[in-house]
Each structure stands twice: as structure tokens, then as C-alpha cells.
Image (cartoon, rainbow, N blue to C red):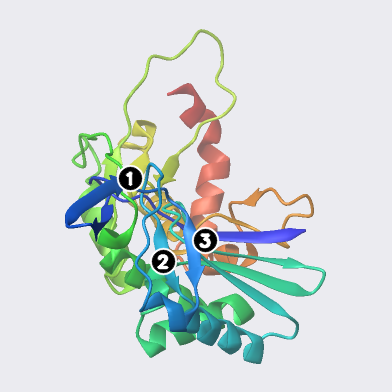
């Protein structure tokens, strides 16, 4: 089975919703479970129910779900099944299994504008890059509808001794993303080196949960060119625009960090070949810092 998981996000803080009804003149309320329940359109407006559980449930408008599923069927070469979730991690995901498209989307998309629903269809069936960007922006704008969990505070340090990450980030954002990438950036913590020679170094990372890019402090050196730091920042920004997925890119179904469309987009960086050459020539020195 080949799968794709996209738009891995985590909301910020909040409390569990409560649902109640009036019974014999007394108001009853209790917390509910995080489960998607389909209700036929003709019943959803008529029936008030209480569910004895411990976290919030969501109620799926079946008519809206079926309408979106029909759109997918019209554009897909094979059968389609669509499930609605309240998952705060995989907001949009899909798998292809024996020619069947099995799609899962967050319930925020059921009442999304027509263009966003069309973007969902284009993304699932065509891997449309522009549609992917608009979907990401829609999710960011409606983050308050995600299940909430507190995130730890992360101190941000952007001004280094030799390179200012915020200036680099803003320049890259304007040139390659039209200023649409809304993430944070910081230098990572400098840690004490263990004895012996280091064999690997992670020059940058992106946390979707925190929407935070971290750059290794070893790059804050006078001999590290600005264009190379910009390339690492650009690479991590791409992880925000083209998130990790599971799919046909990996035969064993593992996560694919750099799918083909990621690699294609990466080559748009003006100093792409130059940056790769510099890294190859200086990786030994970076490992020693």
C-alpha cells in the first residue's frame, strides 16, 4: 500500500469542548471523545444526542461529505472513499490501494469555499503545487478549528555573530515564496562535542508542530557564505510548503522526506549547484566545528 500524509500541524492551546442537552428541566453536560460520527443529513438537524465519553466528538454533515466525495470520484481514475477526521496531526492524507483512492480530510474542509474544495481535488488527483500552497494557507488561517494542545516555549535567536537568520529568511521568503511562508526561524543550541570525530551533522531542521526552522550554529562562521546559509533556510522552508508524506515514492510505505516535487522545487534556488559544491568541499570542516 502506498500512502501520502500531508499538512502535519499541531494547534496551540485550549480546552476540551463540552456538549449537553436539557433533560427533565435540568441541563446535563459532559466531555466527549475525539471521534468522527457520520449523521445523515435528514437526521442531523433533528436529533440531539449525548455521548458518554471523555473528549470532544465531531458531527459530520453527510451531505457535504458525499458532495466532496463525488467531486473526487469525477476527477479520479478509479473508485474513491472519503473519511472526515478531527486529527490535528494529519490534516489531509490519502492512499492509493489497488486502484482505490482513500482520502482523509479534516472536517474544516466540509464548509470550505468552493475554490478550496477544488484545490483538494486537484491536490489528491494531480499533486498540484499551487493547490498545495493554497491548502496550507487555508489550514494556517483556520488553525483555531484544530484540536488544541499546549506547546513548549522556544526562545528564538536569529542574530548570529556573522549571519542574521531573520534577514536571510525574509529575503528568501520574498524571492521564492512571495512572502507567504509563515514560520519561525532560530539558531539551534550549541552543544558540547563528544570526544572523537563527528560523522554526521544536521545543518537544518523543520518542526511542523512548532512551525519552527532551526539552523545549526556551525553555519554561523565567517568562512560560511551567506548564500549557503540561505540555501539551508530555503530547504527547510520547502519542508513547510511540501510536508513529509507517505506514498508511492517509498515501496515499503515509509515516510518520504524529499519527494520528487520537493527536489524539483529545490533546484529553483539561484545558487543551487554552487551551494552543493560548497557543501561537498567543506563538509569535513563543518564536521570538525
**At x 54% / y 54%, what residue is drawn?**
244
Residue 59: mark: 2
User: In the image shown, does 230 or 32 lie closer to the viewer?
Assistant: 32
Q: Pick the quarter of the image with the N terminus.
A: bottom right
Pointer 1: what residue?
210
Name which residue lies at 36% across and 40% down.
215
Evaluate whether residue 97 shows in this view: yes
CA–CA distance between discs 1 and 2? 28 Å
Which quadrant does the C terminus fall into?
top left
The image shows residue 24, relative to residue 219, as above or below, that is below
| Residue under label 3 | 6
Horizontally, is 234 left or right of 183 in the view?
right
* Other-residue count near label 2 (Cα within 10 Å), few / some / many at <14 / 14–19 / ≥20: some
Question: Could you tell me if the residues under marks 2 and 3 are in contact, i.e. CB atoms within 8 Å?
Answer: no
N-terminal label among 2 and 3: 3
Q: Is residue 187 above or below residue 51?
A: above
From mark 3 to mark 1, how far is it between C-alphas? 16 Å
Say whether residue 238 is left or right of residue 19.
right
Is residue 119 among what the camera can see? no
Most foreground residue, 271 or 118? 118
10 Å neighbourhood of mark 1: few (<14), some, or many (≥20)? some
Amino acid at each position: 500500500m502506498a500512502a501520502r500524509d500531508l499538512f502535519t500541524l499541531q494547534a496551540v492551546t485550549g480546552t476540551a469542548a463540552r456538549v449537553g442537552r436539557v433533560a427533565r428541566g435540568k441541563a446535563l453536560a459532559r466531555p466527549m471523545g475525539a471521534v468522527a460520527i457520520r449523521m445523515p443529513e435528514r437526521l442531523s438537524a433533528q436529533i440531539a444526542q449525548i455521548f458518554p465519553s471523555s473528549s470532544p466528538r465531531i458531527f459530520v454533515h453527510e451531505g457535504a461529505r458525499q458532495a466532496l466525495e463525488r467531486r473526487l470520484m469525477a476527477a479520479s481514475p478509479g473508485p474513491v472513499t472519503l473519511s472526515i477526521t478531527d486529527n490535528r496531526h494529519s490534516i489531509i492524507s490519502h492512499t492509493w490501494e489497488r486502484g482505490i483512492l482513500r482520502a482523509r480530510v479534516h472536517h474544516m474542509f466540509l464548509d470550505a469555499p468552493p475554490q478550496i474544495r477544488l484545490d483538494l481535488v486537484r491536490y489528491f488527483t494531480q499533486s498540484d503545487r499551487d493547490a498545495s500552497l493554497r491548502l496550507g494557507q487555508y489550514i494556517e488561517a483556520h488553525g483555531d478549528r484544530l484540536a488544541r494542545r499546549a506547546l513548549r516555549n522556544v526562545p528564538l535567536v536569529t542574530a548570529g555573530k556573522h549571519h542574521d537568520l531573520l534577514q536571510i529568511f525574509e529575503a528568501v521568503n520574498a524571492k521564492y515564496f512571495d512572502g507567504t511562508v509563515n514560520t519561525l526561524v532560530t539558531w539551534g543550541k550549541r552543544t558540547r562535542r563528544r570526544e572523537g570525530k563527528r560523522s554526521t551533522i544536521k545543518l537544518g531542521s523543520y518542526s511542523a508542530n512548532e512551525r519552527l526552522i532551526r539552523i545549526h550554529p556551525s553555519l554561523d562562521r565567517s568562512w560560511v557564505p551567506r548564500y549557503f546559509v540561505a540555501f539551508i533556510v530555503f530547504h527547510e522552508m520547502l519542508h513547510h510548503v511540501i510536508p513529509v508524506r507517505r506514498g508511492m515514492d517509498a515501496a515499503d510505505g515509509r515516510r518520504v522526506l524529499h519527494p520528487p516535487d520537493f527536489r524539483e522545487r529545490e533546484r529553483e534556488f539561484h545558487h543551487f549547484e554552487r551551494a552543493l559544491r560548497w557543501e561537498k568541499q567543506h563538509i569535513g570542516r563543518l564536521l570538525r566545528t
